[in-house]
Image (cartoon, grey):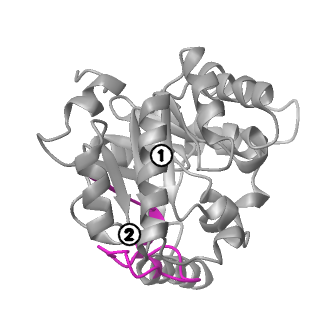
Amino acid sequence: MEEKIQVKDIQGLKNKRKITMLTAYDFAFAQIIDRAGIDIILVGDSLANVVLGLDSTIGVGMTEMLHHCKAVTRAVKKALVVGDMPFEAYQLDTSMAVKNARRFIEEAHCDAVKLEWFEQCVEVTRQIICVGIPVMGHIGLTPQTADKLGGFKVQGKDAEAARRLIEQALALEEAGCFSLVLECVPDKIAEIITQRLSIPTIGIGAGRYCDGQVLVCHDVLGLFERFRPKFVKQYINLSPLIQKAVQEYKEDVLAERFPGPEHSFSIKEDELKKLNKPCGQD
């Protein structure tokens, strides 16, 4: 049996090979992704969009995140599992942030948590790390606060904005983050940040210079039809395949082709005869 990946293993991959990361939200997908050898599985708050059908990640809370994290950690044998802390869990109160981070580790059995950048992010990150919980940072486009950034747009496109991203990255490294997600930033800015940091960077819409890459599994597999970001590469389009299978099932039921003998259970004829006799007769 292969050993479970630890935070130190992820850190040790910088400048050696690229890090692979995908999201998962349930037992079945987590099991498949883990067997495929992905390094990190993120239980992302993107479940609000691709699983729960909400318009914003802000609509998902601790109850939903812990529920899905538990399902994922039951399946995973090797990958590092990171729980995505929802907006309400850490941006309102530092002590509450620490308490909620503990719940991801103690109740849901995650290996680490992820926090999106916000005004008090550095201090909250320090406090969570102080109690022994590994933290993955997240800068650039931060979906939980996208409205403040002008919507879902590329970040760091001018020198001043790029300088802020570099400062945020360095501050989170100094605070103790073990890795950093860079979302929707120009590839050359991601390259500068990656070179400046001693911790791994994991890009999503941040080009090829990052130490690793992450995508939402539903985007990779063609399971989310509402929209597809430019940075997504779809490796298979499962939606029509699944729809075809469901239609075939429906047609088989209507045509009485399913279930067949191979899907049914039988009873011995003599037992059936006993059942047909009036009560008390042998």
Q: Is residue 237 magenta?
A: yes
Q: Nearer the viewer, residue 119 or 134?
A: 119
Find residue 129 and report its horizontal and vertical position in percent.
55, 22
Q: Nearer the viewer, residue 269 or 250?
A: 250
The residue depicted at 71 percent of the width and 38 percent of the height is: 274
Find residue 76 and report its horizontal and vertical position in percent.
42, 33
The residue depicted at 78 percent of the width and 59 percent of the height is: 59
Q: Which residue is mark 2?
A: 205
Give the total of numbered labels: 2
The residue depicted at 54 percent of the width and 48 percent of the height is: 265
The secondary structure type at the circle numbered 2 is loop
Q: Spatial distance from mark 2 to mark 1, Cα to Cα?
A: 16 Å
Tell me which secondary structure the magenta stretch mostly adopts: loop
Q: Which residue is mark 1?
A: 42
The residue depicted at 53 percent of the width and 55 percent of the height is: 264
Point out the residue furthest to the left here.
16
Neighbour tally class for label 2: few under 14, some 14-19, many 20 plus, Cα within 10 Å: many
Quarter of the rendering occupied by the N terminus: top left
Neighbour tally class for label 1: few under 14, some 14-19, many 20 plus, Cα within 10 Å: many
Is 101 left or right of 167, judged from the image as shown? right
Q: Magenta residues, as a range?
A: 212-239
The secondary structure type at the circle numbered 1 is strand
Give the residue type that dot 1 points to. Leu
Labels 2 and 1: the sequence-earlier one: 1
Marker disc for residue 157: none
Point out the residue furthest to the front here.
160
Q: Is residue 36 visible?
A: no
Quarter of the rendering occupied by the C terminus: top right
Find residue 138 and report its horizontal and vertical position in percent.
50, 50
Q: Is residue 206 visible?
A: yes
